[in-house]
Amino acid sequence: MNFDECEDRTRIKRLSDYEEAVGLFKGKELKDGQLLVIFDAFQLVFSENTVEAKLLQERLSDDLIGKKVALLKLGNEIFVRLEHRDDCFIIEESYAKIFDLERG
């Protein structure tokens, strides 16, 4: 992943297609028209007015803080895997759903 430096020297990144980011989830924040998804070593940024940002705001709840979370972007979908869970959810342009990894 290529990172840009922001003012406070935190690495900040936009996910490209077919790219995954994994880390300890620290929270999320709306700032200057963008959603920042904050991890221990970096931040991911999404435009606030996109469907993916709205769904990430809804799905990445505070009870996930401190847990390992992976976000994988595949085209218009974002897969979110959670530590110690057998499922993940998929965020698409039009909807979000639960995907059971055991059933495929």
Image (cartoon, rainbow, N blue to C red):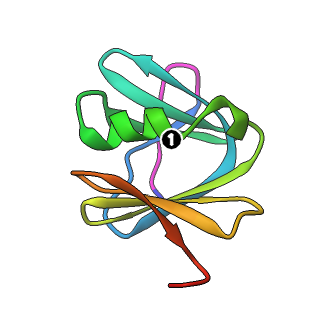
Looking at the picture, tell me which residue is in the foreground, 83 or 41: 83
Q: Residue 102: in sight, yes or no?
A: yes
Per the image, label 1 sits on a secondary structure element best described as helix
Q: Residue at x 69, y 40 (%)?
A: 64
> Can you give x and y, in whole percent of width and height, for residue 22 in the image?
62, 57
**Residue 5 highlighted magenta (yes or no):** yes
Q: Residue at x 24, y 36 (%)?
A: 50
Magenta stretch bounds: 2-9
How crowded pointer 1 is (Cα within 10 Å; few <14, some 14-19, many 20+) is rated as some
> Can you give x and y, in whole percent of width and height, for residue 85 in the image?
71, 63
**Residue 18 highlighted magenta (yes or no):** no
Q: Which residue is mark 1?
A: 59
Q: Residue 5: in sight, yes or no?
A: no
The tally of labels here is: 1
Instruction: Residue 38: name its quadrant.
Output: top right
Amino acid type assigned to the residue bearing label 1 in the image: Arg
Magenta region's main secondary structure?
A: loop
50 lies left or right of 26: left
Relative to 62, is 23 above or below? below
Looking at the picture, tell me which residue is in the foreground, 26 or 15: 26
Instruction: Residue 10: name its quadrant.
Output: top right
> Can you give x and y, in whole percent of width and height, for residue 59 in the image?
50, 41
64 lies left or right of 11: right
2 lies left or right of 47: right
Instruction: Residue 40: name its quadrant.
Output: top right
